[in-house]
Amino acid sequence: MDPREAVMRLHIHKVLYQRTLESQDGRQEAIRELLGAVRPDMSSQAAACVAETVPPLLPELHRKWIGMFVDRLFETAEASQVEVLCDGSEENNAALALAYVMFLESERMEKVIAEDLQSVEAMGGQGMAEVAASLCARLSRVEEAILEAREAKAREYKASGKARPGSDKTH
């Protein structure tokens, strides 16, 4: 392999893997927002519990998929175009990231990703079951704590002689 090509391949791997790591930082927030939209009945504490418990995707998978993208890029793009993309500018790093996302959304990659995720589940199915059990237990504890806090607040209102909020309507 040409040393310049090796440097460009390394650059693309580094840029895309770094972006992947950066996107993991916002992963918990995105999960909480998704849960808020699809499960409005779920408390924010429970959504945070779920977000903290859902494991990130394995780094090996990201490296594999990035490698597949790099191989495909070098197969299909002119060397001069790849050189421009590897100039280190934020604009071209963003272009690489966009091209990578488009690659991941291709029909071929959708199949590869599904197969890879199935193989991870098959190899670590017990680990996944443990994560699910842990998540359920944590959710139960969070929901119990919320219920206890509500009951304690209701007892405080009752003991202080205050009416429950919204119950001061006259008939």
Image (spheres, helix red, strand yellow):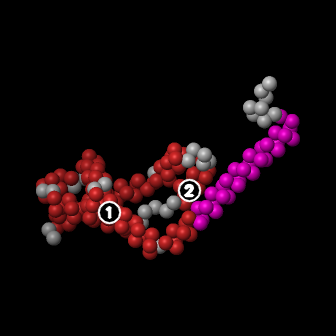
Q: Is residue 151 magenta?
A: yes
* Closer-to-camera residue (160/121): 121
Residue type at tag 1: Lys
- Vertical relation: 151 (above or below) 109: above
Q: Tell me if 118 is positioned left or right of 3 in this view.
A: right
- Percent position of residue 112, x then y: 32, 65
Residue type at tag 2: Val
- Percent position of residue 73, x then y: 20, 59
Q: What's the mark number on residue 51?
A: none
Q: What's the mark number on residue 111?
A: 1
How far, Cα to Cα, is label 1 from label 2? 27 Å
Residue 126 visible in the snapshot: yes
Q: Tell me if 102 is positioned left or right of 117 in this view.
A: left
Q: Earlier in the sequence, mark 1 or mark 2?
A: 2
Majority secondary structure of the magenta segment?
helix
Q: Tell me if 12 is positioned left or right of 167 in this view.
A: left
Single out the mark in the foreground, 1 or 2: 1
* Quadrant holding the N terminus: bottom left
Query: Residue at the location (75% across, 51% down)?
Result: 148
Q: Quadrant of residue 119?
A: bottom left
Kindly state the secondary structure of the residue where label 1 is placed: helix
* Closer-to-camera residue (85/103): 103
Residue 15 visible in the snapshot: no
Q: Outermost residue, front direction?
A: 171
Q: Residues within 10 Å of mark 2 (few under 14, many from 20)?
A: many
Query: Residue at the location (77% across, 32% down)?
Result: 167
Q: What's the mark number on residue 50?
A: 2
Q: Quadrant of residue 109?
A: bottom left
- Vertical relation: 123 (above or below) 168: below
Q: Which residues are magenta?
A: 133-162
* Quadrant holding the C terminus: top right
Query: Residue at the location (31% across, 57% down)?
Result: 104
